[in-house]
Amino acid sequence: MNIPSKYLEDLVEHFSSLPGIGKKTALRLVLNLLKRDQSELEAFSKSLGEIQNNIKTCGNCGNISDAEHCEICLQDSRKQELICVVEDIRDILAIESTQQYFGTYHVLGGVISPMEGIGPNDLNIESLMSRIETGEISEVILALNASMEGDTTNFYLFRKLADFDIKVTTLSRGVSVGTELQYADELTLGRSIINRLPFDMNLMKK
Amino acid sequence: MNIPSKYLEDLVEHFSSLPGIGKKTALRLVLNLLKRDQSELEAFSKSLGEIQNNIKTCGNCGNISDAEHCEICLQDSRKQELICVVEDIRDILAIESTQQYFGTYHVLGGVISPMEGIGPNDLNIESLMSRIETGEISEVILALNASMEGDTTNFYLFRKLADFDIKVTTLSRGVSVGTELQYADELTLGRSIINRLPFDMNLMKK
């Protein structure tokens, strides 16, 4: 692709460095931006240039925040003795949207991945351990994705947590609510049989 | 989605204003950006903020350019009497990549679309007409997309050009090279029969 302006090419390069955005998509985005008001572009540019300085990380759980501690950690109604360990803040948003969890979180910032050169020391595991060492935590929920890297990280954390008198749980896996059994994949259907639960009338009503 | 930082939310808003990018994708992009070096973000931000001031439009054809006239208009080898009318600069890139066209272009900057409130006066039609009024143009190729809006614009331009002694052509439509006939859509296959061509041994070899 022979873009006729080096300024345009420059901006296309920046956009195409983003995950899932190729050169052609980047060009489409930039041409769209060219039609905007200059004031709008300046606001976008300012927001982008200052984002790293403006955003803070919660000193307790690693969630993104505008203050020293995030809103979730500051809420009185949250059970401070419960920690849900997640990979990144998008997982917090997903779990929060269920309105079924009332504990705190801990953001690892990734998972152990030897292929990408990410080891335990690159993740926020030390801060998790110091939260646990206070002795105020009763349960840790490992809510990582069910991938090779997620499982490796689960296993690593499980071994580290074994030294403490803490309940360690993971999310239940099973057939999605609303999925017809014949279309569920074998692995998931198999797990949902192994982990079958006592019938609960209350869950049916929801 | 309840994003825990207003700075983050701000940037996500900007990204999700781009075509084809929703809130979730925007958040993924922004979280990726947060892991970059500040210097990289500043370069991105600068490129974005200055793009409108840096980029010029070719005074002749409307192509994007870093100078008064674009590279294509300045090339001596180009047939200046030939104009290919396109919707936007991505079409120029596509046609240039074929290496089969040696004339100049004219970028309309859109197509007539009553639904979106775009009329002939919003497009670069006046500058096209003044190029034609010089009397130095022998052929205009209408290379707009085969959509309702593209056809409307083609028809509008065709009527305007009828006053001049100029050949007006459009791109040929037909079955793609490499497509098996049984999978071609009826409309396209029908058009390629109506517009059938004398058999040419030279085209077979390419």
Image (tube, coloured by chain):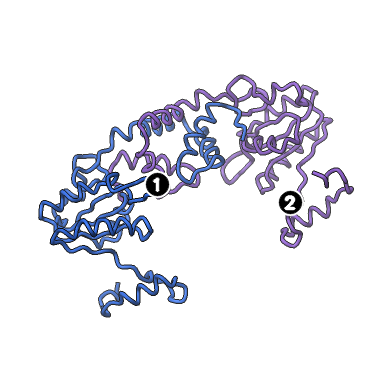
Chain colours: A blue, B purple
**Point 43% across, 73% down: residue:** A186
Question: Which of the labelled discs sits on residue B169, or is there none?
Answer: none
Question: Which of the labelled discs sits on residue A116, or is there none?
Answer: 1
* Real-space CA distance between mark 2 and mark 1, rounded to the nearest whole angstrom: 41 Å
State which quarter of the image contains the N terminus of chain A: top right
Above or below residue B53? Residue B125 is below
**Point 30% across, 50% down: residue:** B2
x, y percent for residue B12:
38, 42
The local secondary structure at tag 2 comes to: loop
Q: Chain of mark 1?
A: A
**Point 84% across, 30% down: residue:** B165
Left or right of A30 on screen, residue B69:
right
The local secondary structure at tag 1 comes to: helix
Camera-side residue of A84 and A205: A84
* Amino acid marked by disc 2: Ser
Residue wearing tag 2 = B176
x, y percent for residue A18:
45, 41
| Other-residue count near label 2 (Cα within 10 Å), few / some / many at <14 / 14–19 / ≥20 | few
Q: Chain of mark 2?
A: B
Left or right of B15 on screen, residue A35:
right
Above or below residue B151? Residue B60 is above
x, y percent for residue A116:
39, 46
Rendered image quadrant of residue A184: bottom left
